[in-house]
């Protein structure tokens, strides 16, 4: 069972315009998929500005969400 959480947030106008442009160019994607992919990719990178250490491993839940979003499963 997958639990979904709604997020309401304000984003800068430039980012909104970029998102609109992306969605216009990729009609098979929607705003929720873009945000899910972006957030899960961020979490896969360890949410750290520096490169991850060898001991760090990606979060399996973030990896699953990222791949499911990319492949629309």
Image: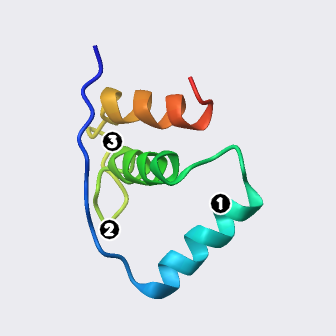
Q: Are marks 3 and 2 in contact (CB under 8 Å)?
A: no
Residue located 73% across and 54% down the image: 26
- In the rendered image, which residue does mark 2 sit on? 49
Residue located 63% across and 47% down the image: 29
Q: Going from the N terminus, do you reach mark 2 or mark 1 first?
A: 1
Within 10 Å of the Cα at label 3, are there few (<14), some (14-19), or many (20+) other Cα atoms?
A: few
Within 10 Å of the Cα at label 1, are there few (<14), some (14-19), or many (20+) other Cα atoms?
A: some
Q: Vertical placement of 42 versus 11: above or below?
A: above
From the image, state whether disc 3 or disc 1 is nearer to you.
Answer: 1
Residue 61 % position (x, y): 32, 28
- In the rendered image, which residue does mark 3 sit on? 54
Residue 30 % position (x, y): 56, 49
In the displayed structure image, the side of residue 4 where residue 15 appears, left or right: right
Q: Of 50 and 43, which appears nearest the observer?
A: 43
Q: Vertical placement of 43 versus 62: above or below?
A: below
Q: Going from the N terminus, do you reach mark 3 or mark 2 first?
A: 2
Q: Classify the position of the C terminus by image quarter.
A: top right
Q: Going from the N terminus, do you reach mark 3 or mark 1 first?
A: 1
Residue 44 % position (x, y): 38, 44
Which mark, residue 23?
Answer: 1
- Picture quadrant where residue 40 is located: top left
From the image, state whether disc 2 or disc 1 is nearer to you.
Answer: 1
The residues tagged by marks 3 and 1 sit, at their Cα atoms, a distance apart of 36 Å
The kind of secondary structure element at disc 2 is loop
Residue located 30% across and 49% down the image: 53
């Amino acid at each position: 069972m997958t639990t979904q959480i709604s997020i309401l947030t304000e984003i800068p106008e430039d980012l909104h315009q970029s998102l609109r442009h992306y969605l216009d160019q990729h009609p098979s994607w929607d705003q929720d998929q873009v945000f899910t992919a972006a957030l899960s990719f961020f979490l896969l990178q360890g949410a750290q500005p520096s490169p991850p250490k060898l001991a760090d491993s990606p979060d399996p839940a973030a990896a699953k969400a990222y791949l499911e979003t990319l492949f629309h499963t």
